[in-house]
Image: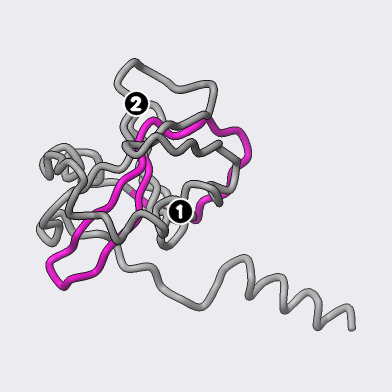
């Protein structure tokens, strides 16, 4: 039993799935659901375009839920600058997202990829990019 738990822990920690890095050349559109323009949002309270309010949690569960529920209105959202995102993710390593000491996100949006995929992402202060679809951090 002790060995079985150890093996399960190792599989869970390292995972068997290889993460495919976001290619800067594959990003076609950026759709902005929320963007905080005044610096760092330490409160963690987000008011969206439709006046709904989302509260931040360390695992970003409420944000992922909001992204999933607003995806049907994606064409109504403001489009962002693709170059801003490309400049943030270029030449960065990725790690699994482990919220130890984190700050609320200053923006969370959608990336429309060339192959039609829709990627949820968030940006913390200091331009730390988090792929919320796959729980990967670019640093």
Kindly state the secondary structure of the residue where label 1 is placed.
strand
Residue 51 is situated, as x and y percent measured from the top left of the image, at 39, 34
The N terminus is located in which quarter? bottom right
Label 2 neighbour load within 10 Å: few <14, some 14-19, many 20+: few
At horizontal 19% and vertical 59% (from top left) the residue drawn is: 112
Residue situated in front as seen by the camera: 58 or 6: 58
Could you say which is closer to the camera, residue 70 or residue 63? 70
Compared to residue 17, the image places residue 87 above or below, namely above
3D distance between C-alphas at marks 2 and 1? 25 Å
Query: Which residue position holds label 2?
Result: 36
The structure's colour scheme is one colour
Q: Is residue 139 visible?
A: no
The residue sitting at the top extreme is 38
Residue drawn at the location 13% of the way across and 62% of the way down: 26
Q: Can residue 23 be seen in the rendering of this structure?
A: yes
Q: Earlier in the sequence, mark 2 or mark 1?
A: 2
Q: Element at badge 2?
A: loop
Name the residue carrying label 1: 95
Q: Quadrant of the C terminus?
A: top left
Residue 32, above or below 95: above
Give the farthest residue toward the right: 1
Name the one closer to the observer, 99 or 65: 65
Q: Position of residue 73 (x, y in %)?
A: 26, 55
Residue located at (17% from left, 39% from top): 87
Residue 17 lies in the magenta stretch = no
Within 10 Å of disc 1 (Cα), the crowding (few <14, some 14-19, many 20+) is: few
Residue 43 horizontal/vertical position (percent):
54, 22
Where is residue 113? Give x, y as percent. Answer: 18, 63
| Range of residues picked out in magenta | 93-122
In front: mark 2 or mark 1?
2
Q: Is residue 2 left or right of residue 62?
A: right
């Amino acid at each position: 039993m002790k060995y079985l738990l150890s093996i399960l822990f190792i599989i869970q920690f390292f995972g068997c799935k290889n993460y495919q890095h976001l290619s800067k050349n594959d990003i076609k559109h950026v759709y902005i659901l929320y963007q905080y323009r005044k610096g760092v949002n330490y409160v963690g309270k987000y008011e969206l375009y439709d006046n709904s309010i989302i509260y931040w949690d360390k695992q970003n569960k409420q944000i992922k839920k909001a992204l999933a529920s607003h995806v049907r209105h994606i064409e109504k959202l403001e489009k962002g600058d693709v170059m801003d995102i490309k400049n943030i993710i270029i030449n960065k390593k990725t790690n699994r997202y482990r919220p130890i000491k984190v700050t609320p996100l200053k923006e969370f949006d959608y990336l429309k990829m060339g192959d039609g995929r829709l990627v949820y992402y968030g940006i913390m202060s200091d331009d730390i990019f988090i792929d919320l679809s796959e729980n990967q951090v670019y640093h």
